[in-house]
Image: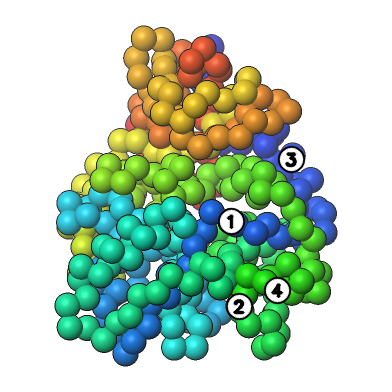
Amino acid sequence: MAPHFYTDAPCIYSHERKLMSEKPRFTILEDRGLLAVSGSDRVSFLQGLVSNDVEKAGSGRAVYAALLTPQGKYLHDFFMIQINDVLFLDCERAGLDGLKKKLSLYKLRADVALEDRSEDFTVAALFATGTPEAPDLGSDSGGVAYPDPRLASAGARAILPRETAETVLGQAGFEAAPFEDYDRLRLGLGLPDASRDLIADKSILLESGFDELNGVDWDKGCYMGQELTARTKYRGLVKKRLMPVTFDAPPPDAGTPVMAGDREAGEVRSSLVTEDGGIGLALMRLEYLDSAENLTADGIGVIPFRPDWMEIPDP
């Protein structure tokens, strides 16, 4: 029987090519929030806490990073972008209060202020043909656009005043698209979406693609959780990977085990119903990726596939 691990999934990529051949599009990401970090110590404060180099964040360059537990387990992930003298953290809106409280614990005497700006600004995903560049929204837009720092094929993102975001993006040549269009592109690329795919106090960055997706800087100074993250990389301890899968019927709920016969091979995370059945992400045990056994989740056929960016060692 042919192995169930594919490096390509034609039904997904054909749809992706169709999406990307249309007019440049935008989706307002209502599930995202914005935490503003200001004060003269904002960079050094975050530098000692998060997985990436905060100094690389600029007005047109975002940095993808995570905040971990001292034991190296995932808590929050976000994009950092500098706008004037403020670092904005584009984060999951449902987890913003928790992120703010966690960061507040480490402020001590640092000159840092934390403010939820989600009511004032909104986040948009921008996607278009090929490898689109972030558009110049103009100095009067009140916001900024920047390439998605994870993958060029993910397009770009923008932070704009909530009241004028759709108008500004329309004037820049972008057409509004439903969230499902962006979500399908995201899932096909294998990009995790915060708590939909990552579990607080449990997920490990390198199982979730943060190395290849530019979410970890291996040359910066110490940060919280660095020891386990480095040990996982240099000792080759990654035994699972969060990766795209297709389903031959509407996907089961998140948390449903992926089974290889009577053995658990993985776990379903976020997903989306498609005309062919479904697409999603699943945390898969590497030993089962080339299994000759049928993989199923709640009786539904599952086929993992590896995106081009994902590095998986030979068994």
Give me the C-alpha separation between circle 3 and circle 4.
31 Å
Of the image marks 3 and 4, the number of the one nearer the N terminus:
3
Of the image marks 4 and 2, the number of the one nearer the N terminus:
2
Mark 1 or 3: the one toward you: 1
Residue under the point 41% across and 28% down: 255
Residue 141 visible in the current orientation: yes
Q: In terms of depth relative to the viewer, which is nearer, 88 or 128? A: 88
Where residue 118 sits in the image (x, y, percent)? 51, 67
Of the image marks 1 and 4, the number of the one nearer the N terminus:
1
Is residue 306 depicted above or below 138 in this figure? above
Identify the residue position indicated by label 4 in the image: 164
Is residue 239 shown left or right of residue 92?
left
Of the image marks 2 and 3, the number of the one nearer the N terminus:
3
Residue under the point 46% across and 56% down: 92
Where residue 12 sits in the image (x, y, percent)? 67, 37
Give me the C-alpha separation between circle 4 and circle 2.
13 Å
Query: Judging from the image, what secondary structure is the residue with disc 2 in?
Result: strand
Mark 1 or 2: the one toward you: 1
Is residue 39 shown left or right of residue 137?
left
Where residue 230 sits in the image (x, y, percent)? 23, 56
Give me the C-alpha separation between circle 1 and circle 4.
15 Å
Identify the residue position indicated by label 1 in the image: 30
Q: Are marks 1 and 4 in contact (CB under 8 Å)?
A: no
Identify the residue position indicated by label 3 in the image: 15
